[in-house]
Image: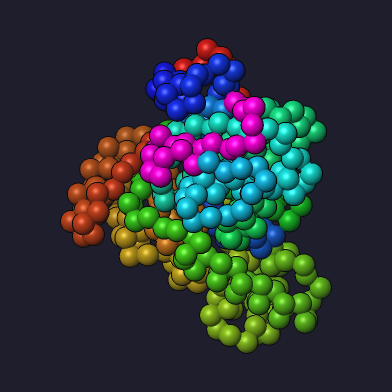
Amino acid sequence: MREQLESTFKELFGSADGAEFFFAPGRVNLIGEHTDYNGGHVFPCALTLGTYGMARKRADNKLHFYSLNLTKPGVIEVPLDHLDYSDNYNWANYPLGVVWAFAQRGKTLDTGMDLLIWGNIPSGSGLSSSASLEVLTGLILKDLYHFPDLTMIDLALIGQYSENNFNGMNCGIMDQFAVAMGRKDHAIFLDTSDLSYEYAPIQLADSRIVITNSKVKHSLVDSKYNERREECATALSQLQTVTGIRSLGELDIDTFLQLQDVIDHPVVRKRARHAVCENQRTIQAAAALKAGNVNRFGELMNQSHLSLRDDYEVSCDEIDILVDLAWTVPGVIGSRITGGGFGGCTVSIVHNDAVDTFIETLGPQYQERTGYKADFYTVDIGDGAKKLDAAAAF
């Protein structure tokens, strides 16, 4: 693929002289969904799937963006003095938003840039293709324009800021943090209230992580994701009339149950119940995995899905079918929806000797019941975003 990027770069921009290669992974969240904007814990890991970028500075003030995945509308050109969102820019609003967010921090670019990207994260799958592209862009800007004071955590925060304020998606920090800070064969146990974190080795004994893509694509900006965030904010403000918490993540389950009646709307109460209980599940799940109790981890994954389905209502019929089918397969330790919801993927932990049966069972039955052909990825956990060696093949 490296050769194809070089060939296309030369075709589009005249030569590849001085261009550098970069990579940012996708991510899967093992447990801890919709807790990151509620001051709770998450437990994601970076994948070896991701987004590759080839970039170099220009001599003028033009930003050029081109994607090998989305060849329409062709090369997108934006002048540095007009860093404004436009529907015409399509996917390029994500890297453009990062350039804009750099400028908001006083990190202005002195020249334009040519950027060619290609990724192997399925679009709309919930594996954070947008966060991958944002952190990739941030790393490229840090390297090409020499901003050595920016840390990888800074790049994650800039990516989140750009998605919140440029693209209008009120996501939490988890996706960008996992993409920027991933470590091979480890998940990140992250407290989103203060960004304290620790790496947890993923030791699944004789099991593997299997991601199943429902092929139901979601657009979180157009979904009810932002509505869920607003509902949690409403719940928090009502709880703050009787307790001094700053986020839902500060509550344990017993305290929430004692105070929940102050939330006057039953739907909003359900949303808050998920946020509080999911945070506690995530804490318990990380401890279980650390203790080598993979079966307990799987039980908590299953509970997480039920809560996301019933209390947070971010699942959908197709995802529920995949999870229900997974739960019937011997050797499946746990299975749940992953990502923002409203489509996308499930994540399952499956015994090695049951992986083939898992795929052979879910594939045909899911297609028969929904009309969609699911894709399956037996994934490896990789490192976070990085500049690629001059000789690195991909």
Query: Residue at 72% of width from left, 66% of height from top?
Result: 247
Q: x, y (%) of residue 37?
A: 65, 60
Residue 249 appears in the figure = yes
Q: Give the range drawn in magenta.
A: 56-76
Q: Which of 354 and 376 is in front in this view?
A: 376
Q: What colour-coding does the image apply?
A: rainbow
Left of 159 or right of it: where is 11?
A: left
Q: Is residue 327 above or below residue 22?
A: below
Indicate yes or no whether the magenta region holds residue 88: no
Where is residue 87? Give x, y as percent: 49, 56
Name the residue furthest top: 391
Q: Which residue is drawn at 64% across and 49% down?
A: 82
- x and y percentages locating residue 69 in the rendered image: 39, 38
Report the front residue among 262 and 150. Answer: 150
Identify which residue, 239 or 129, lies in the foreground. Answer: 129
Counting from the top left corner in percent of width and height, residue 137 is at: 60, 37
Quadrant in which the C terminus is drawn: top left
Whether residue 202 can be seen here: no
Q: How many labels does the image show?
A: 0
Eyeballing the image, is 59 above or below 228?
Answer: above
- Is 66 magenta? The answer is yes
Above or below residue 161? Residue 267 is below
Q: Which residue is drawn at 32% across and 38% down?
A: 355
Query: Which is nearer the eye, 107 or 44?
Result: 107
Q: In which quarter of the image is the N terminus?
A: top left
